[in-house]
Image: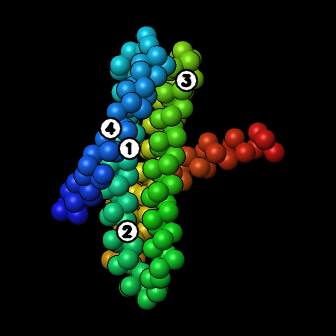
Amino acid sequence: MNSSNNYLEKILEFHNGALFVIAIAPSYGISQIFNLIFEGVEKKDLIMPLVVVALGIFAFFVLYLVDFILGINASRKKEIEITGSRLWESFWKFFGVIILMFSMVIFCFLFIALNLEGFYRTFLYLTIAINIMICLYEFQSIGKNLEILYNKKPKYFTFFENISRTVEDGIIKKIQKLFN
């Protein structure tokens, strides 16, 4: 925490506050542009995508962290080497989810600013669905790692897999038949 305070102090003290003075005019201009773009838009319509993404990222981060720790332990148990590239792959997965979620927020903002309520709602629901899918995938991965570590998976992970398998067999395969 101390290094971040030092960084902020360095920014504020740079050339005796020159960056602050330089930043004042664009910050006023940008806020005025946002007021113009989002004129007439209800605040709840601007806040909702941010809340959805914030909650989704928080849930994903918690599951990701648990999966990451269990994945390292499972790799050690299976005597799989934990390389830098595998760790980077995990980081990029996390980074990719963050970028995807913020892209969804930008589209929600764009559609609400253009007064395209249908597209806004569609992207908002799609954002929620993607968040849930990402979290469920991490949840499933936690189950796999627990099975490796303890040679047994808790029942709720098995229940989730059975539901997924039923959906795949019942719905997904019927949809595939329609297109084949």
Depth-wise, is mark 1 or mark 4 nearer the camera?
Answer: 4
Query: Which one is earlier in the sequence, the residue at label 3 or at label 1?
Result: 1
* Circle 4 residue: 21
Q: Residue furthest top?
A: 40
Query: What x and y, as percent, mark residue 134?
Result: 46, 50
Three-letter amino acid code at disc 3?
Phe
Query: Which one is earlier in the sequence, the residue at label 2 or at label 4?
Result: 4
Query: What x and y, as percent, mark residue 120?
Result: 52, 24
Camera-nearest residue between 108 and 160: 108
Residue 68's mark?
2
Give yes or no for contact between labels 2 and 3 (Cβ–Cβ under 8 Å): no
Depth-wise, is mark 3 or mark 1 nearer the camera?
Answer: 3
Q: Secondary structure at mark 4?
A: helix
Mark 2–mark 4 distance (CA, rounded to whole Å) = 43 Å
Residue 168's mark?
none
* Circle 3 residue: 111
The answer to whether 122 appears left or right of 60 in the picture is right
Mark 3–mark 1 distance (CA, rounded to whole Å) = 21 Å
Can residue 129 be seen by looking at this rendering? Answer: no
Query: Which one is earlier in the sequence, the residue at label 2 or at label 1?
Result: 1
Q: Secondary structure at mark 1?
A: helix
Q: Secondary structure at mark 3?
A: helix
Q: Residue at x 47, y 42 (%)?
A: 102
* Circle 1 residue: 56
Mark 2–mark 1 distance (CA, rounded to whole Å) = 18 Å
The answer to whether 2 appears left or right of 57 in the picture is left
